[in-house]
Amino acid sequence: MEKIHRRIVFAKWFTVFWAVFFLICTLLGHRIAAAYLAVNTAARASFLQTMQLPVLLVLGYACGACVLVLLYRLVLFLTNMENGLFFTDVNIAHLRTVSVLFMAIALLVAGIAVLYSLFFLSISFAAAFLSFIVRIVADIFVQAESMKDELDLTI
Amino acid sequence: MAIYVNLNVVMAKKKISAAELAERIGITPANLSVLKTSRAKAIRFSTLEALCRELDCQPGDILEYVKEEGGTHDPQ
């Protein structure tokens, strides 16, 4: 049980670290894109010609927002588990939201792949796959909650 | 649930309170209340044994099966 608790705590702080990192990237997203385009003049000319940059920025920021909410829900989920609350309605809701956000990210990154580089399709497929996996885990938590309720009502 | 727990009737006959019975059989008063109101999903044999021992009765005196379709529950 101690090992499990330590893994949960580690996962929680690892998630918090990534959330802070993504927040910084989201806030500095425009500067990062501008710095990249300043260095890569060919890409800059292409972007300006096809007006892809504003669309890419919107998709990128939407992705960033989804990632931040996803990481926030994961931190809440891991905090509940750290406090010994495993199979509860709240945790199931967190997992379902994470699953939906992964699918949203998959669709947004697919849009980026169409506009910029087909390489991003691999990230889109990975996000879609994670969405299905997390949804299955949420369904397993539903079953576990039902079994726990039955056990709690065994006198 | 088609199984009814007639603890109230047996407890009244033996003149024992819920708090005292719960303490004697080693369960919380809240769990005894869950049992009395037929909200329990299952009962352990050890709990059933303790109930029969303290109330000096048979399992059939505590548990009653009522058919679901139009059956009437007569608590005697």
Image (cartoon, rainbow, N blue to C red):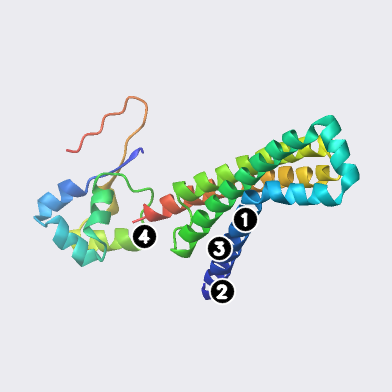
Q: CA distance from mark 1 to mark 2?
A: 32 Å
Circle 3 — which element? Answer: helix
Circle 1 — which element? Answer: helix
Q: Could you tell whether A25 is left or right of B36 in the image?
A: right
Q: Which marked residue is nearer to the observer: mark 4 or mark 2?
A: 2
Q: Is residue A138 visible?
A: no
Instruction: Give the number of callouts.
Output: 4
Find residue A92 and report its horizontal and vertical position in percent.
51, 47
Residue where numbered disc 4 is placed: B45
Circle 4 — which element? Answer: helix
Q: Chain of mark 1?
A: A
Q: Looking at the image, which is closer to me, A90 or B57? A: A90
Q: CA distance from mark 4 to mark 2?
A: 34 Å
Q: Which marked residue is nearer to the observer: mark 1 or mark 2?
A: 1
Circle 2 — which element? Answer: helix
Residue where numbered disc 2 is placed: A3
The answer to which of marks 1 and 2 sits earlier in the sequence is: 2
Q: Is residue B41 visible?
A: yes
Q: Which marked residue is nearer to the observer: mark 3 or mark 2?
A: 3
Residue lying farthest to the left in this orientation: B15
Residue where numbered disc 3 is placed: A12
Q: Chain of mark 3?
A: A
Q: CA distance from mark 3 to mark 2?
A: 14 Å
Q: Residue at x 78, y 38 (%)?
A: A112
Give the label on residue A24, or none.
1
Q: Residues within 10 Å of mark 2 (few under 14, many from 20)?
A: few
Q: Looking at the image, which is closer to me, A76 or A109? A: A109
Q: CA distance from mark 4 to mark 1?
A: 59 Å
Find residue A126 and report its horizontal and vertical position in percent.
76, 47
Q: Could you tell whether A18 is left or right of B11 in the image?
A: right
